Amino acid sequence: MPVDPLYFFVIPLALVLTGLFAAAWVYDIKTFRRRKSKDETVYRCVNCKRIFTDIHRTPLARCPNCGKQNEPVPAR
């Protein structure tokens, strides 16, 4: 039974591309999607008690509801 030489090229190429796609997908999940949640700082307004986040790492952030400057909530 003769084997087409094209199979010696197509099957390894498909396996390599599948492996590269899987590695890129795992890298995306482990780095970029996790980093998105860590970049936000949580604040709680002392005036109106609203909880909000800000992507800028500043010592104070302005409340979007009342405009008062607030310090970040300590991480637990």
Image: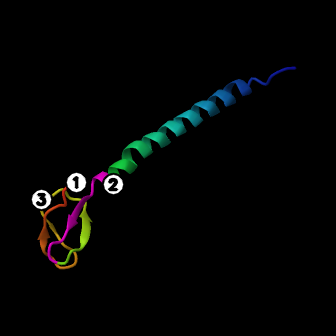
- In this rendering, position of residue 5 left or right of residue 47: right
Q: Secondary structure at mark 2?
A: helix
First in residue order: circle 2 vs circle 1: 2
Q: Amino acid at mark 3?
A: Pro
Q: Amino acid at mark 2?
A: Ser
Region of the chain picked out in magenta, as a range:
38-47
Residue 7, placed above or below residue 28 = above
Q: Is residue 58 magenta?
A: no
Residue 23, placed above or below residue 2 = below
Q: Nearer the viewer, residue 32 or 1?
A: 32
Residue 73 placed where, x, y %? Answer: 19, 60
* Label ID, residue 75: 1
Q: Quadrant of residue 55?
A: bottom left
Residue 36 placed where, x, y %? Answer: 34, 53
Residue 65 placed where, x, y %? Answer: 22, 78
Residue 20 placed where, x, y %? Answer: 52, 35
Residue 35, placed above or below residue 48 = above
Question: Extreme top residue here?
Answer: 1
